Structures are given as C-alpha cells and as structure tokens.
Image (spheres, helix red, strand yellow):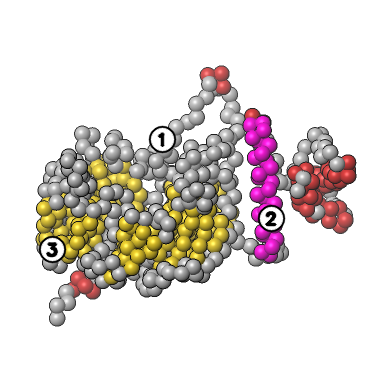
Amino acid sequence: MGFSFRDKMAPSTPLLTVRGSEGLYMVNGPPHFTESTLFPRESGKNCKVYTFSKDGTLFAWGNGEKINIINVTNKGLRHSFDLPKAVCLEFSPKNTVLATWQPYTTSKDGTAGVPNLQLYDVKTGTCLKSFIQKKMQNWCPSWSEDETICARNVNNEVHFFENNNFNTIANKLHLQKINDFVLSPGPQPYKVAVYVPGSKGAPSFVRLYQYPNFDGPHAALANKSFFKADKVTMLWNKKATAVLVIASTDVDKTGASYYGEQTLHYIAVNGESAVVQLPKNGPIYDVVWNSSSTEFCAVYGFMPAKATIFNLKCDPVFDFGTGPRNAAYYSPHGHILVLAGFGNLRGQMEVWDVKNYKLISKPVASDSTYFAWCPDGEHILTATCAPRLRVNNGYKIWHYTGSVLHKHDVPSNAELWQVSWQPFLDGIFPAKTITYQAVPSDVPSEEPKVATAYRPPALRNKPITNSKLHEEEPPQNMKPQAGNDKPLSKTALKNQRKHEAKKAAKQEARNEKSPDLAPTPAPQSTPQNTISQSTSGDPEVDKKIKNLKKKLKAIEQLKEQAAAGKQLEKNQLEKIQKEKALLQELEDLELGI
C-alpha cells in the first residue's frame, strides 16, 4: 500500500530552525519545543545560510565548506556541493532547482570574474546553468508557481526562460530601463509588473503585462506613472488581480520627514488605477494584502501612526486609530491581523480579529527584530537577533491570545542570527475558530516594566494632570452603518475627501508660515472661538460668518439648557440638528473654500 498511519493524521507542527554562534539546529514546534532529532546539530560558527523548499520537505544549508540538501521527512542527504563562499540559497517552487549565489569577484589583473549564480538540478545534482550576477539584491531568478516560466533582470531588461531550459531565452521584455519586476503569484495566465524609473523630467512608471504579450503600444494591461519615485515596492495580491505600489523619494523636500516621501498607488489588471488617499501625513511604514485579495492594510503617518484597512475601491473599511506601530502582519488564513511597533519602538502588539474588528490581545515583545506567523495560523514567533541587536538575543513562541508558550534566551557570550518556521503549503492547516481566552502556559509571564514619565522635582508631589503630547484616535468602523444615516454617495464621498484635503493643505500652509503657533484642531462639536472675529476682506463673507457664529452660539445655549433638564420645543430641537451643517458652512467660509 505504501500508506502509513501518519498520512491520515493531522500534519505535525512546523519545525523551527535556529542559526547562531552556537551552530545550526532544529526545534520541534508547539507543544513540545524539544530539539529535533530529524536534523543533527551542525556545531560551529560557520553556517552562513539555510533555506527550506516552499513545501517544507527539503532543507539546504551551508557550513562554510559545502552546501548540503536533505529530505526533512526521511533525513536522507540528497546532495552536497563544494561552495564554501555561498551566502544565498533558494529552491524553485516545485523543488526542481536549487539556486545559489556567492559574492562576485574580479581578479587583480582586471579580467572578468567567474559566474557566481549557479542553478543546480535537485534530482541529479548537476549544474544546469551559471550566470554572472553582480548584485546581491534581487539575485534569485523568479519562477512562476508551476515553473513553466522563470525570469531574470539583465541589463535593464527582463529575460524569460521556459520549463527550466536556461540555454535559450524564450522571451524578452525590453523598455527603456527596467529597474525591477515582480511575477504574479498563483496559476496561469502569468502577469508581470515592471518598474521604470523616470529620467530627464519624464515620470517613473509601473506597467502590468500578461506573459508573453509584451509588444505593441497597447500590450500593457495597465500603466501608472508618477513623479515622486526614486524607488518602488510592488506587491501583488494572491489572486493576481491587482498590485499595490509604494513609491518613495529618498529625500522629503519639505523637510518634514527623515524617511523621504511615500505615496501608495493601486493598479488592477483590468486597467483601473488610483492613488490611495491616506488620511494622515507622514511616512508609509508597511502595507500588506490580506490572503483573501479583497482588502489591504496600511500603517502610515507621523507617530503615533494610523493603521487602516482599505477595500479594492481604495475606500477605508476600518480604521484602527493611532498607536505606537510600524508593521502589520495578516495570519496565513487572513482572519487575524497583528499591528506591531518593532525596531525603534517598544514592541507593543495588537492582535485583531478582522472579521469582527475586535481586539483579541495586546502582548509586548520588547527589542524584537523579527516576527513571523506560524503556518498553522495560531502561533507567532518573535526574536531578537544579531547584528541588529547584540544583547538579549533569543526568541519566543506565542499563542495569538497573548500567552508566551516557549522562551529561549541565548547565553550572554553567544549570538542568535536567524530563526524561522518550516514552511507548509496553503490549505494543509485548516482555519480554526478564533478564541479570545488566553491559552494556558507554563512560561511565567513577564510584564515589561512600563517606564514612568519623567517629572521635575517641583511637580513630584502634585496631582498628575492628564495632558497628552498627541491626541490619540480610537478605532472606528468606516463602513456605512445600517441605520438612519444613509451611506454617502460616491460623489459626496469624493467631495468630502476633496474638502478635507483642501482644509488640511490650508492648515499646513498656515503652520508653515508660523510653525510655533500651529493651532490644535478644535473638536467638531464646539463652534470656533467667537471672540476672534475673522476678517476675510470680503464684507459679504464677513457678514455671513458673523450670522453663522450667532446661530451657533444660540445652539450652544439651547444645548446647555437641554443638559440642565429643560424640555425644548420642537423648533429648538430642529435648530440643534442643524449645528453640524452650520459648522461645515462656517469652516468653508473661514478657509475660503
């Protein structure tokens, strides 16, 4: 039969691979966390690189002398290659090819160096092809999921090979200077997104093509050009229907940001494109697609940053408010989203159920330099690795409900360089119902000590006044609520956005003129200060402004009477209902819109 009992059982939990100054070894996943016997520990400090195949069945690593491939399920050594200098490894999607890269060197007499990118046949161990690949960035060729096509960026054009025949270039995509490209995921027909940087006053652009239709002026499926782009990041959704493009400039000419300027663009294969309107100024830290391909989450804006989920119309669906965060991670099944603040932030995480927009837990993983969801969609790995941080190296395995299930600290004289999950193909682990109750754990919880704010000696015995440096925004659902409020029409939404953008621009212009006196926005429910009589220079407008302020003052008095328990007449109640419209009108007049 050749059918073992094991095949009928649920898949075992993914293994963890750990690489550091103590060597390379594997650890069994939850619930055991014991060192795995599948892989004998490779001691010594010479392991520079390892990789799993996409389905997790093959494992390749370098020990400073050879690159070895083993089959994880039966521990059998497949092949060994003499590649002492290799620092990058990657398997093709169906485990046919192992790609290896070593730094490119030229000889002293100036003659060209030898090819440093090798493609090996995993079955036979023979070298299929060698290329010269000078840069480490984007070193690896890109395969389609079924390996029918493979692509490389060579001298500003994309070369395509078919069925792993690397001796014949089957196709070329040539534009003036292709800086970067990304193949679409999933099944055929394959699409490719290419980025051409702008030059001599011409804009940069991203174009989408369907393989192999590259020729002619109308060959592109979609095209989006933009001026502010020194570099771009292109993100396909899983269903290959759209690409998100984060365009960045190296320098922010306004001087507002150390990160340069970023804009977010949406391009669909049906030709539609849009700029995603982000309601807060500042850097874009992270953008991620949900595996459903119907929504994406962006983390953006000066700290405390905003996080918002958008639909395919680029309309906001849910806004998580503001907080100390710079990263977002959807779970493999797409039903949980982690917002986190790593790097120069303190490691605070928020775990959200994104079907119901409910907060599940708020764990803190201080000093983390790495985060990864386990393929089972239940466990999370956070780690502190060198060289990013050379102290307190180690890793933790969490359950998404916030419990730490396992913790490993590296001795103070040792370093952790890399830790990661064994991958599994989609669909192997079924999605489970979300639980809000923290799962039990044997690991004692260490609540990080929250540093209290510094208080000068003169204030130390006085009551604390609750003044915040930043106004914190709470999460809010952006979907039109069922009820008396009719959802805004597209035009109304457009106008509302235009109005808000204009208002923000005018406000910023004022702030730039007098940065020390940047006004704090007044809460919407109270009318602007009535003492400062604004003069617009137009007596007609001033008269209208004066009248509106009078009406708003009267409304304010009525509201106070109602709050004091007075029964209001019908016409008085109607007056109160008009407050929002009057405020809007007043604001428009004052801003000269």
Q: Left or right: where does residue 350 sit relative to residue 489? A: left
Instruction: State which tag comes first along the sequence, 3 or 1.
Output: 3
Magenta range: 489-515
Label 2 element class: helix
Q: Position of residue 445 (x, y in %)?
A: 35, 43
Q: CA distance from mark 3 to mark 1?
A: 54 Å
Q: Position of residue 126 (x, y in %)?
A: 13, 63
Foreground of the two, 217 or 446? 217
Instruction: Look at label 2 and name its amino acid.
Output: Gln
Q: Position of residue 78 (x, y in %)?
A: 12, 62
Please report the residue visible at 88 percent of the width from the left and 44 percent of the height from the top.
540
Q: Nearer the viewer, mark 2 or mark 3?
A: 3
Q: Nearer the viewer, mark 3 or mark 1?
A: 3
Q: Is residue 288 visible?
A: no
Instruction: Look at label 3 and name its amino acid.
Output: Gly
Q: Quadrant of residue 373?
A: bottom left
Q: CA distance from mark 2 to mark 3?
A: 62 Å
Foreground of the two, 509 or 170? 170
The residue labelled by disc 2 is: 496
The residue labelled by disc 1 is: 449
Label 3 element class: loop
Eyeballing the image, is 583 above or below 415? below
Q: Which of the numbered marks, if any, corresponds to residue 125?
A: 3
